[in-house]
Amino acid sequence: MHHEDRKGLEHHQVAELHAYFPPSVISQAPFLWVPADGDEGISKQEIFDTGKVIPISNKGCKLDDRNRIEWDTKEPRPPNWCEKINY
C-alpha cells in the first residue's frame, strides 16, 4: 500500500498500543534446572534469589564429588516436565 493511500486508515488505540510486542515480552520465561550442590547450599540460595524472577529447581540432579552432574536415571526428566497429549 502506498503511503498516500493510508491517510484514510484509522486504527483503534488499543491495536496501536499492542501492535508489536517483542518475543522477550510475550514469551514464557524458561525453566532453569540446576544441580544440587550438597552441603554448600549455593543452589538453594540461587533458587531463592532467581526464583523471584523465573522458575528454577534443583530436584532430580546433583553434583558428585568430582563436580559432574548426576541425575535420576529411572526418571530422567526435569521437574517441570509434563506428558503432552498427541492428537
Image: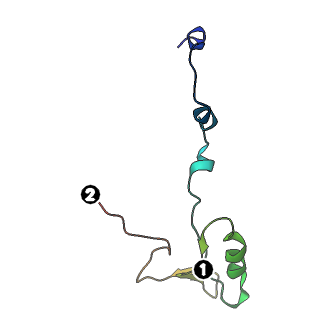
User: Residue farthest to the bottom?
Assistant: 39
Q: Residues within 10 Å of mark 1 (few under 14, many from 20)?
A: few
Q: Residues within 10 Å of mark 2 (few under 14, many from 20)?
A: few
Q: Secondary structure at mark 2?
A: loop
Q: Which residue is mark 2?
A: 87
- 21 above or below 50? above
- The residue drawn where x is 43% and y is 82% is 73
The disc at residue 5 is none
Q: Based on the displayed image, in which of its 4 quarters is residue 86 positioned?
A: bottom left
Q: Give the amino acid at mark 2.
A: Tyr
Question: Residue 77: x percent and y percent?
Answer: 45, 74
The disc at residue 68 is 1
Marks 2 and 1: in contact by CB < 8 Å? no
Question: Residue 19: x percent and y percent?
Answer: 59, 34
**Nearer the viewer's eye, disc 1 or disc 2?**
2
Q: What's the CA distance linking mark 1 and mark 2?
A: 39 Å
Q: Based on the displayed image, in which of its 4 quarters is residue 31 positioned?
A: bottom right
Q: Secondary structure at mark 1?
A: loop
- The residue drawn where x is 57% and y is 34% is 15
- Which colour scheme appears in the figure? rainbow
User: Residue farthest to the left?
Assistant: 87
- The residue drawn where x is 60% and y is 8% is 4
Q: Earlier in the sequence, mark 1 or mark 2?
A: 1
- 41 above or below 26? below
- The residue drawn where x is 68% and y is 79% is 43
Residue placed most toward the observer, 50 or 68: 50
| In-image side of 31 versus 85 (left or right) | right
Q: Give the amino acid at mark 1.
A: Arg
Q: Quadrant of the C terminus?
A: bottom left
Question: Residue 59: x percent and y percent?
Answer: 55, 81
